């Protein structure tokens, strides 16, 4: 498994902590930046990692900013990306098992480092359950690229 990894300046230290964890587990990754705590725009870094997942260069991604919200919104603009912001282990498990999320987003200002590692571990090691969930993922995929201005009947 190869992981696309990125963060903005707010998520830099947590990203570095996650990199050490991935190395200890023998999990390969590519760091798409940033390289320090100098302020940068999170959409630029999120786009780099999410694009690599979209192209199939990486099976999964982890993207970090202060809250995890901005990078999730950015990544989810790309077709085929299902980025999930997870702040607890239950959400991480469901993001994979039920939603087949391919990108985990984390908020470095929201969760501590140890919880982040638990979430990463669950996200990377939980399989998609398929079944009834597959039908729901297909419905989400069918919405990509459409401009819906009303309720779906």
Image: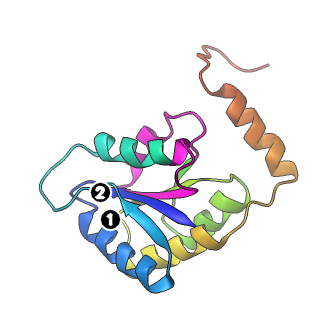
Secondary structure of the residue carrying tag 2 is loop
How far across and how far down the image is residue 115, in percent? 45, 78
> Could one spot residue 5 in this view of the protein?
yes
The residue beneath circle 2 is: 66
Residue sticking out furthest to the left: 38
Q: Is residue 32 left or right of residue 81?
A: left
Is residue 59 part of the magenta span, yes or no? Answer: yes
The residue positioned 46% from the left and 41% from the top of the image is: 51
Secondary structure of the residue carrying tag 1 is loop
The residue positioned 76% from the left and 34% from the top of the image is: 139
Is residue 65 part of the magenta span, yes or no? Answer: yes
The residue positioned 80% from the left and 61% from the top of the image is: 129
Name the one closer to the observer, 136 or 38.
Answer: 38
Q: Quadrant of residue 91?
A: bottom right
How far across and how far down the image is residue 89, in percent? 57, 72
How far across and how far down the image is residue 126, in percent? 68, 69
Name the one closer to the observer, 73 or 18.
Answer: 18
**Quarter that holds the N terminus:** bottom right
Q: Is residue 148 above or below residue 112?
A: above
Q: Is residue 147 left or right of residue 113?
A: right
Q: Which mark is residue 55?
A: none
Give, as a single range, the part of the protein colored magenta.
53-82
N-term-proximal mark, 2 vs 1 = 2
The residue beneath circle 1 is: 108
**Quarter that holds the C terminus:** top right
């Amino acid at each position: 498994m190869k992981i696309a990894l990125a963060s903005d300046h707010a998520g830099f230290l947590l990203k570095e902590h996650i990199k050490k964890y991935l190395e200890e587990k023998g999990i390969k990754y590519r760091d798409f930046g940033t390289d320090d705590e100098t302020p940068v725009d999170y959409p630029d870094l999120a786009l780099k990692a999410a694009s690599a997942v979209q192209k199939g260069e990486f099976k999964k991604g982890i993207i970090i900013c202060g809250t995890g919200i901005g990078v999730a919104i950015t990544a989810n603009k790309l077709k085929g990306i299902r980025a999930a912001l997870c702040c607890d282990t239950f959400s991480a498990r469901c993001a994979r098992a039920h939603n087949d999320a391919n990108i985990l987003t984390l908020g470095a200002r929201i969760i501590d480092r140890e919880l982040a590692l638990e979430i990463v571990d669950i996200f990377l090691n939980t399989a998609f359950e398929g079944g009834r969930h597959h039908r729901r993922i297909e419905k989400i995929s069918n919405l990509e690229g459409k401009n819906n201005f009303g309720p779906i009947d």
